[in-house]
Image: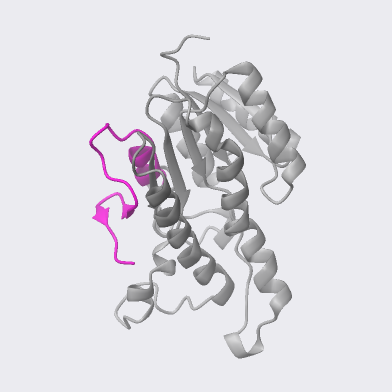
Amino acid sequence: MNGTLKVALVTGANKGIGYEIAKQLGEKGITVLIGARDAARGQEAERSLKDQGIEARFVRLDVTDQPSIDEAYHYIADKFGKLDILVNNAGIFLEEPLPSRNDVGTMQQVFDTNLFGVFRVTKAMLPLIRLSEQGRIVNASSSLGSLTLMGDPNFELAPFLVLGYNTSKTAVNALTRFFANELMDTPIKVNAADPGYCATEMNGFTGYRAPQQGARAAVWLATLPADGPTGGFYNEEGPLPW
């Protein structure tokens, strides 16, 4: 395998922001692996990207299912021998009542995908990322996970008090810092990206930003130069408060 070839795995890449992240990375000449649970939708995304001249391959990957993650790892190891970029984009949003009326089952379901899924995939793929000359890990977060902004009544998304989703993103930010600290003495950079309030299937297409815009921060962080930041939380305009 050509050592100059860059390979990126994007989870939840068959639609929405994940698809746009894969597309924008592919437009930079990076081979993109479309991580998706649904084979039909993953293959459709692969065909769509290939029709646009992008080197794309569907990889079945369910972030809540360790065997599928292990299979994806072995596929990437056998086919490419390394992984340069991991974008942990897959996530879910469930309608939730006020915290006092919520239930543990809903919280567990959201955390299983949004937090533990990030942890599972990152831990599994890290040996391959260590083989890259400039490994990059980007975790999809949200300004809704900012403890600072949660307490600001003037924050534009202040009404969105969704316990499971918001706190899962707070935890993703913490996980980002932990991995960044562990990898501080390596070329690997680990950051969290906020796409903003984008119109996607997850929110019933109510967002005011396009998925193409939402992908920008993740793509920037996935292609940082050697002197770029690590352990941070950013949108496309710059750092966000924890």
Which of the 4 image quadrants contains residue 202?
bottom right
As for residue 25 lying within the magenta part, the answer is no
Report x, y in % for residue 230. Answer: 32, 46
- Residue 133 on image: x %, y %: 39, 24
Picture residue at 53% right of the left edge, 57% below the top = 205
Q: How many numbered callouts? A: 0
Residue shown at 34%/51% (left/top)?
231
Residue 112 occupies quadrant: bottom right
Is 50 above or below relative to 11? above
Q: Nearer the viewer, residue 88 or 45?
A: 88
Q: Quadrant of residue 60?
A: top right
- Give percent across and percent down for residue 165: 55, 68
Q: Is residue 78 left or right of residue 182?
A: right
Residue 47: tell me if it is visible. no
Q: Is residue 32 left or right of residue 27?
A: right
Q: Dividing the image into 4 quarters, which one contains the C terminus? A: bottom left
Does residue 128 appear in this view? yes
Decide: is 101 above or below 12. Answer: below
Direction from residue 61 to residue 152 in the image, left or right = left
Residue that sits furthest to the bottom in the current view? 100
* Residue 233 highlighted magenta (yes or no): yes
Specify the farthest residue to the top: 2
x, y (%) of residue 232?
32, 53
Q: What's the image's color scheme? A: one colour
Range covered by the magenta-colored residues: 215-242
Vertical arrangement, residue 46 with respect to residue 180, above or below = above
